[in-house]
Image: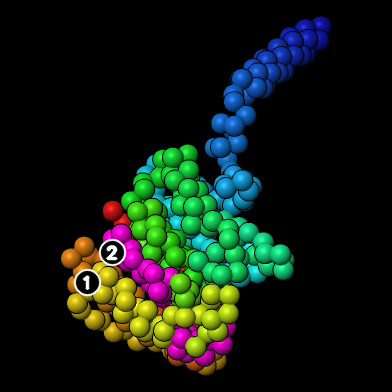
Amino acid sequence: MESILFQHREKQKLNLLKRFLYLIFVLQILLSCNKNDDEVEESIWTTKSFNFKHDGFVRSYILYKPQNFKKNSPLVFVLHGFGSSSLNIMSYSQMNLVAEENGFMVCYPQGSTLLSGQSHWNANLEMSSVDDIGFLSNLAKEVQVNYQINPKNTFVSGMSNGGFMSYTLACEKSDVFKAIASITGTMSGKDWEDCNPSSGIPVMQISGTNDRTVPWDGTMSTAYGWGGAPHIKEVVEFWADQNQCSIDEKINFPDIVSEDKSTVSLLKKKGSPKNNQVWFYTVDGGGHDWPGSWGNKDISATQEIWKFFSLHLK
């Protein structure tokens, strides 16, 4: 009899415990339902696509927000090449990994599409009338406001046509973008003729001596407004003069991977009154590549970009 009573009491305790746990579960659901959906989503996402309306067109971009993101963190734009996409350069550049390690936000905007079907950036080219200068600078300002980004630490980098566009922004929007990095790009013909930046701006350039798409010797065709700039060495000197650099430092990187049949050297232009530097990487034997992802494997272009930008944080 006592055994039966004991079992009955234990069963009652168990039922009470189950009811208590159930009430806690329901309470948690009710509390979560009271939260704003946007707040919940905002707290958990790291990579997300957005739309942005500019000049009557709906443009798109991808943001990467590191898990350790804080207010006043830097913002890095990464621009894809001609015919490519924001998703593609996000994949091969692996900038998200560097952002996660260093706590900065990355923006991958999407270029607009020509009638021929190819995506592009209008770096003051004759083939386009798209206002990419306005789009990118206004987008940067919106992201700065939405995520409380330090406007003094917004930078832009790009591959090929994205590198061209980075130079265009250096010429016309140095008040928004505080340093640029061009990977296998150069200045368009019009930019070379008309560039008059409002202030000095740090510039980084990576060029391959065997690049057939954007030849480093300045022999790119002037069709559609692409060519017209001289040898990339002269372009680099132009920006060194703009920043009043007076000291040269040469670095030769070890040939870690001899199979890629290329080596890398870096010329640092320093001594600027504002501490702006100009870095010029020569990939001897390199082509139209993003070093570290394909082509030369002695350096990582992505790591070098952040190294350069982080040197100019305010």
Identify the main secondary structure in magenta: loop
Would residue 258 be seen by someone viewing this image from the given angle? no
| Label 1, residues with CA under 10 Å away: few <14, some 14-19, many ≥20 | some
Q: Sequence order check: which comes first, mark 1 or mark 2?
A: 2
Q: Is residue 104 magenta?
A: no
Real-space Cα separation, disc 1 to disc 2, in angstroms:
8 Å
Whether label 1 touches label 2, CB < 8 Å: yes
* Image position, residue 135 (x, y; %): 52, 52
Give the camera-side residue of 311 and 220: 220
Residue type of the residue flagged with mark 2: Gly
**What range is drawn magenta here?**
191-218
Residue drawn at x 74%, y 14% is 15
Above or below: residue 213 compared with residue 58: below
Number of residue marks = 2
* Image position, residue 148 (x, y; %): 41, 40
| Label 2, residues with CA under 10 Å away: few <14, some 14-19, many ≥20 | many
Would residue 167 be seen by someone viewing this image from the given angle? yes
Give the camera-side residue of 169 and 248: 169
On the rendered image, what quadrant is the N terminus found in?
A: top right
Q: Which residue is mark 2?
A: 200
Q: Which residue is mark 1?
A: 244
Residue drawn at x 38%, y 64% is 171
